[in-house]
Amino acid sequence: MMSVSSLTDYNISRERYEDYLAKPIKERDLFTQYDGLIFIDSGGFKFLNNDGIDGSDFEVEMNQRAVYEIQSAMGGDIIVNLDYPIAPDDSHADRVEKARKTAENIHTFLSVSREFEGAKYLTLQGYNYSMMSEFLEVITDSVPEGVLREGFDGIALGGLVPKKDDRDALIKAVTDCREVMAEWDIDHWPLHVLGISSGAAPILAAIGVDTFDSSTHIHSAINGKYYKSVTEPINIEDVDFSDCDCPVCQSDLLVERMKGNAEYKKDIAGPIAMHNLIVAKHEIAAVRERIQTGDTDALIDYLEETFSHDQTMRRFAHKVVNQSLGGYF
């Protein structure tokens, strides 16, 4: 997972920018052993306030055509249209106008990406059923429903970054999104949620989210937090690395770096972040394994075992069980 807007973070030179676009990611020597998918976000959340790439010796104006050219050049397997994300303090008129501008970009996106061979996800904005439904209604004023169904392969639910730590809001947004998708006859599409906290990922997987992107594992590592689980980060100074069998903690070199024996902070935080990501992925996999068996009781048992002793998360786990999984009784 990466974003076009990542290119705005480092005040890069034109030479470096052109190098990034010279060859698809998976064709580069560094990634020859990588056999996964590459999801490239459009960067709408950042470009809403900064409409271009401002490099050290060049500038690039960002619009839908420019974003798609970058996504394509970098070899994205899954891409999304450039959207105008909503904000909690937006008025109704603001949200409608952002949906209208997003519809304009969708027109361009579907036109320039005709030859794209990967999957295309439609960005959907909203915190609840009525907001998402209205967003799609505004979109389809300009782009017919049939064109959307033929042109896209999945949904990327956005606008939730300001609410990424609000579990109630995330649960409502996902359950309402699935309801809207069913009413619009696109419930067979995969659902990706943009920019959430990894601590919420297992619960959201239980109620129908297929994929996520999150930087929580990185920010936790930068702050010296090591995951025993996604709900139990501990200070790196208190870690017994022998308790973990992940590849990071089984490497003497990386353990020494996590202990602080490295010249640069990135070499200390990097292995911690990778460990945190592995823990998060394992917990999501445990949820999905239970979903695939079709055994709701096994999923409920997992949520209870995982979150029952965590005061912050327990009530959200119970909410998922009671509202989405048929309850305890």
Image: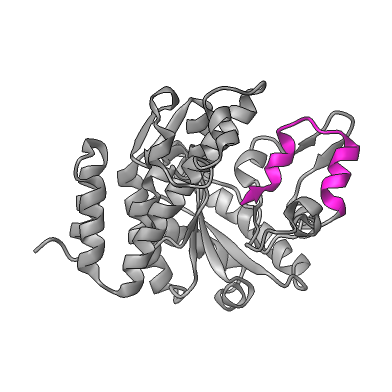
| In the displayed structure image, the side of residue 188 where residue 129 appears, left or right | left
Residue 25 spot, x, y in % from top left: 76, 55
| In the displayed structure image, the side of residue 185 where residue 27 appears, left or right | right
Q: Write the residue at 43% across / 41% down.
A: 164
Q: Write the residue at 74% across / 40% down.
A: 7
Asked if residue 273 can be seen in this view, the reply is: yes
Q: Write the residue at 63% across / 46% down.
A: 44
Based on the displayed image, in which of its 4 quarters is residue 131 positioned? Answer: bottom left
Give the colour scheme of this rendering: one colour
Q: Write the residue at 67% across / 64% down.
A: 77
| Residue stretch in magenta | 1-22
Residue 217 spot, x, y in % from top left: 49, 39
Q: Nearer the viewer, residue 311 or 175?
A: 311
Q: Nearer the viewer, residue 104 or 321?
A: 321
With respect to residue 153, does 268 lie above or below?
above
Based on the displayed image, in which of its 4 quarters is residue 11 positioned? Answer: top right
With respect to residue 146, does 58 lie above or below?
above
Residue 86 spot, x, y in % from top left: 51, 45
Asked if residue 66 can be seen in this view, the reply is: no
| In the displayed structure image, the side of residue 311 where residue 200 appears, left or right | right
| In the displayed structure image, the side of residue 113 where residue 223 appears, left or right | left
Secondary structure that dominates the magenta span? helix
Q: Is residue 64 magenta?
A: no
For the C terminus, the image quarter is: bottom left
With respect to residue 205, does 3 lie above or below?
above
Residue 67 spot, x, y in % from top left: 74, 52
Q: Is residue 8 magenta?
A: yes
Q: Residue furthest left?
A: 329
